[in-house]
Image: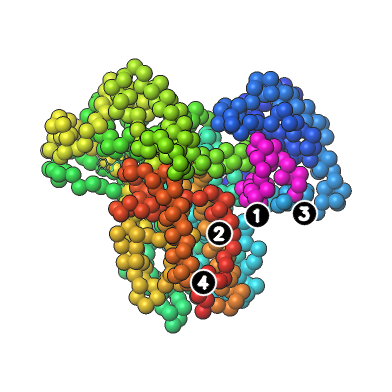
Amino acid sequence: MTTPSVQPTIKPLTAADDEIAAALAEAYLPPLLPALAFLTGDLGLLRPHLRIDPLTAREPQGGLSPEQQEEIRALALTTLATYRDAGGQTPLHRKQAGGQYAGGQTPLHRKGDDALTAIMEFGSGGADLTEYTDLLTEELGIDADHRAPDWTAAEFDADDRAPVLIVGAGMSGIVAGHRLNQAGVPFVMIEKNADVGGTWLENTYPGCRVDVPNQSYSYSFAQTDWPQHHSPRPVLLEYFRRCADEFGLRPHIRFEHEVIDARWDDAAALWRVRIQPADGDAVELDAQAVISAVGQLNRPNLPDFDGLDDYAGPTFHSARWDHDVDLAGKRVAVVGTGASAAQFVPIIAESVAELVVFQRTPNWFFPVEDYHADIAPGLRWLFAHVPHYRSWYRFWQFWRGAESVLPACEVDPEWDGDRTRAVSALNDEMRAMLTMYLEFQYESDPELAAKTVPTYPVASKRVLVDNGSWAGALLRDNVQLVAEGIDRFTPTGLVDSSGAAHEVDVVIFATGFQASKFLTPMQVVGRDGSNLHDRWAGGEARAYLGVTVPDFPNFFVMYGPNTNIVVNGSIIFFSECETNYVLSCLELLYRGGHQSMAVKADVHDAFNAEVDAGNRAMVWGASTVNSWYKNDAGRVTQNWPFSLLDYWRRTRTVDPADYHLH
Ligand code: NAP
């Protein structure tokens, strides 16, 4: 039996009207008419009075009124019944069959088609998408993988060069491997773990799930049938495993191998890479290029507390969860209240005897009602039976989550409000709204509210996703929130800065990662002996577009400096953009018969000055609250300060003038 494709095939629509109507009762409506207009080519379905209002886009059903919803469902039912009665044919299909449209695609599939733009504009609530349509067509990914390379190494007689070496087979490594495979570029992937999946393999803590919507947190070219809006870790791991299988990557991967160092040999124009297998001696491999796809959030940050060594009970970090420690009935301390703690605290709170949560800085939360919910059966049925509805749903998620919150994160130098609490009127409005959300939840416990409602500006730190489970956990009788700092550990527990002792059986560190230490512990030595870690000492990691570094020829970083997003979009989008850029660089090398390329220092420096200024103008750069976005000197080394469109544009193709080519 062959494994079904990651991308499910659409099932024939033969259901009776009442079955379709029942599914439509659970449909998500904002992308439904766009999907049907795309399917049928009937733009008359895009009735102006049924368009969502962007101002209410975040409300359930995009803020559509019950009357609008009813009319959309009725229109959809008629359209789908006609489609069914025509045997799954539409006027567009008939033209296609009659030979007017070649290649199984209609004009609607093409970038820049006017009708496609009109559908997108309707779906966005009337935005002017002139600049966005190409990006959005790629994101839709309907019947075409628009980001696939349109060249092969063989065309340039480059298919017998030394392999490209990808370090890491997580989310970024998989897309890089897939694209190299498509282009016929020889490559090897080195993975320290025994399987693919990266963060989704390593993080096994209870409640681990993706906190951006799954339809966005998936490859544009491998959209799939998700069971939940924010799927749990096992589902995500399975997705990445299946992608690796389907893209034929496993034969290229050396599992349980770790790159020790990579040294650039200028004379040979090769990276000499030393690799340590789990068993046996280190091996050497020559690579024409190295792509680091090692991830950024996988080296646990374990603070050095006084007395920690004396503590007698078990301790572990959230990303190295010790499943041998049974927490049931125990007194447990959790240090840290970031994204990881927010996911597992509500779960372990149900079985432990007592839970003491040590909070240093409270979080802002975006309410997301369906955070833990299954995708309703009717909606899932429609995804399975209505061609392209799933992609239009992704379009909707992408658009809604893309740039919409960004304006509320920009610093307004003219704003004369309290700058410790907000950076603009819009940011202040968002603060007021999210404050209301939190205060409502802690209504019964004003003391807890005082400790947990932040006062620093929203989006200075990562805003977490919530459906009430965090407050629900903190309000439990067996849970105590300690907002005082940790003074020291004792053999039996912790003492907080007020002097209160907390006796506990187990301590869990949810203290995040050493995010500023990019690419450690791997050593990378470039031209003239330049060491990347020296270059980036003190957490001063910088790269051009987050990808290339002067003096490190043919070395490409994925999820590198300043490519993290705070409030908008999915990190997979960035990985796809970075991969496009790397492939464009390789094409430039091959097409010109070059052996190496290194970004020019002035191009790199000018870009970084722009990014630094951009980040200072955003709330996460301007606010003084501590966050993993900044290095010790207070510079934001993690975040991309501009729009997704901007990053996509800059990474579409390499500009040869930016590089020294040899
Ligand atoms: P984190 O957000 O960095 O949170 C670490 C927590 O530990 C913070 O509350 C921090 O307090 C606290 N802390 C650190 N050092 C401390 C010390 N010395 N004393 C007391 N408290 C200390 O780490 P995380 O929760 O693991 O998440 C990291 C990132 O991973 C997230 O921002 C996100 O990008 C990603 N992530 C994603 C998901 C998802 O999508 N499902 C889930 C988990 C993580 P301060 O706030 O004061 O620093």
- Marked residue nearer the N-terminal end (1 or 3): 3
443 relative position to 396: left or right? left
Q: Is mark 3 within 8 Å of ligand 1?
A: no
Image coordinates for residue 87, horizontal then vertical, percent? 81, 36
Amino acid type indicated by mark 1? His
Residue at 77% over, 49% down? 107
Q: Mark 4 or 3 closer to N-term?
A: 3
Region in magenta: 113-142
User: Residue 448: in sight, yes or no?
Assistant: yes
Local secondary structure at mark 4? strand
Q: Is residue 363 visible?
A: no
Residue holding disc 2: 651
Instruction: Give the crowd class for mark 4: few <14, some 14-19, many >=20 residues within 10 Å.
Output: many
Q: Which mark is residue 87?
A: none
Picture disc at residue 103: 3
Tell me the distance, in whole angstroms, between the alpha carbons under discs 1 and 4.
26 Å
Which residue in the protein does label 4 denote?
659
Q: Toward the viewer: 523 or 19?
A: 523
Amino acid type, callout 2: Thr
Q: Is mark 2 within 8 Å of ligand 1?
A: no
Find residue 299 and report its horizontal and vertical position in percent. 33, 52
Q: Residue at x 63, y 72 (%)?
A: 154
Of badges 1 and 4, nearer the viewer stands: 4
